[in-house]
Amino acid sequence: MKKSSTTLKTVLALMANLSVVFVCFTITRIVFMMCNMNLFESHLTWSYALRLLVSGLRFDCTAILYLNCWMILLFLLPCHKKEGWKWYYPTLRVVFVIVNFIGIVANLCDCAYFPFTGRRTTWNVLTEFGNESNILGIVLKESLPYWYLFPIGILLCFGLWKLFRSPVTNAKPISKGLIKYYISHVILLALASGLTVAGMRGGFTTAVRPITLSNANQYVDHAIDAGIVLNTPFCIMRTIGKKPFTEHRYMDDREAQSLFSPLHEVSDSIGMKKMNVVVFILESFGQQAMARGCMPFLSELAKQGVSFTYSYACGRKSIDGMPSVLSSIPSLVEPFFLTPAALNDLSGIAGELTRKNGYSSAFFHGAENGSMGFQAFANATGFEKYYGRTEYNQDSRYNGDKDFDGTWAIWDEEFLQFYCDKMGEMSEPFVTSVFTASSHSPFAIPERYKEVYPPSEPKVFSCIKYSDNALRLFFEKAQKQPWFKNTLFVLTADHISESIDQEFLTDLGVFRIPIIIYSPAMPELTNVDPDKLVSQADIMPTVFGLLHYDKPYISFGQDALNTKKEDKFILNYQPGSGLYQYVQGDWMLQFDGEKTVHAYRFKEDKLLKKDLNGSQPKEYERRLKSIIQQYMYRMNHNELVVR
């Protein structure tokens, strides 16, 4: 066989194999779009969808070249006897299928996981469930509703195997023209290496930085659509070892602090009210479920206290909710739990009240102790005790693991009764928090309630009805306790779950959760303006305002009750697109770290269809920059507490 023919066949075979992987990635992208069409259907047209598919090839190129750089090297490596090694290409074929099938599986997994997070999976997400001892069982249960992804994966794996091309099968070793052979292959390998590196970086020029997740924003009209353009292997590779907090110097420190200061220095002359503080973090209690009547008890309780029309989560996952609610640390860039900043000195509602004011404190979560990193964060932020599944099982008043839901935790009804009993054993004043668990995928409810709360669409709604009833039973018991009348209750969600109305599927709507403040000792709460903007990060300063807390503390939120309506803002982060979302007045800005890329009048344009970028008040972007600048600095320099 001629040398030139062998070289050409090698190149053609290599290109054919890579092309098959590109086709497989495109198929998984189409499957991803179809599985999550309810998130995109309000704005996705055929032409726009085609544009997103084409744009995704740029990110596929990077991921595929990373996955297959070894194959490029081994295909083009000059070795004149390689053609005679019968085992060589069959071995490459096996490795090729395994490596690329892993990438395909990662993409298919996000078809199911994306609705819960709004982002493609990153390296940090893979460590999120590291403390779950029953992770295999959880994965199997979670994947059952998406059974159709398994045959799709198998078919794509078969395609990789069947369509693999070897350049030489029965050729004799090259014995003539070895010098030309080696020269041509060295040149070809050098050229391929340069093209591969350029493809991995996302461009050829020296001005091109390695392509990152945020580059997806230049191809999309809506932040959530970045999930279509990106692919999961790319997102995992680009976040391995990544420093989460990049410091910015938008302005000098004095100007930044004049626009917003996370250091809250209290000038209240009224003595502190030493009330008990009880904070509920309710799994997946989204605002849409409340609007649909799935929370009758919580809705009634809201009328006895204060709730807010425009209330939002700071993140999209459970591990975003706890730092936001209890320590006023919103999730900007990556979940706080999964960053080096989690080792910083921390405080929060519990830390301030326990360490500085003599409160007793405890955190409750019905899952296995250590689950989700909650126990570690509770300890770090100042809770003295932790009550989980272990402590529940040790309490002879309850049924132990007979009340385990089989996947995550103790059923909410039983665990909230346990929660109430344990608070009765604590010395007052106390601060406690409970993180519920039943309204979580796979959305199971106890057998005795299956006819009371029949299956719904989405499935989470029936679970929320069950958990809302568990909350009602808790308050029925709690109001008979001596500590009840001197207690301030805060009830909110960690994040939303599934939604069906388009208003709750927009870039802002996916953060909408209830935030309710209630106290039998504070009837005046019913006179608060409900139209203020409020986020999870505002809970700590608002609680401290109601208690007339008199010591300085760090918070990235505002006192919702004592801040002027026109000055009130909220801030959250779209992890899938890397955009900050800043809301003030009637405006929502989406900011990419350098400039505002979209702006909407969100109250009148509920579906965020009319981009008015350029018309928004200019001072809003300045204030956003000041918050980001101080947030990143404090995270990197361990300045989250007042020393």
Image (spheres, rainbow, N blue to C red):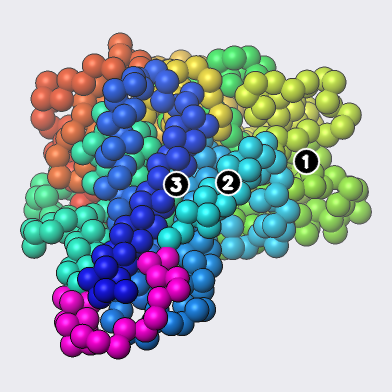
**Magenta region, residue range:** 166-187
Q: Amino acid at mark 2?
A: Leu
Q: Which residue is mark 1?
A: 411
Q: Left or right: 574 with respect to 144?
A: left
Q: Quadrant of the C terminus?
A: bottom left
Say which quarter of the image contains residue 74.
bottom left
Residue 240 location (% of width, % of height): 38, 65
- In depth, the one of 552 and 595 nearer the eye is 595
Query: In this rendering, which labeled residue sits more in front, label 2 or label 1?
Result: 2
Q: Which residue is mark 2?
A: 155
Q: Amino acid at mark 1?
A: Trp
Say which quarter of the image contains residue 68.
bottom left
- In depth, the one of 185 and 360 nearer the eye is 185
Q: Secondary structure at mark 1?
A: loop
Of the two numbered discs 3 and 2 on the same chain, state the one appearing first in sequence. 3
Q: Left or right: 637 with respect to 454?
A: left
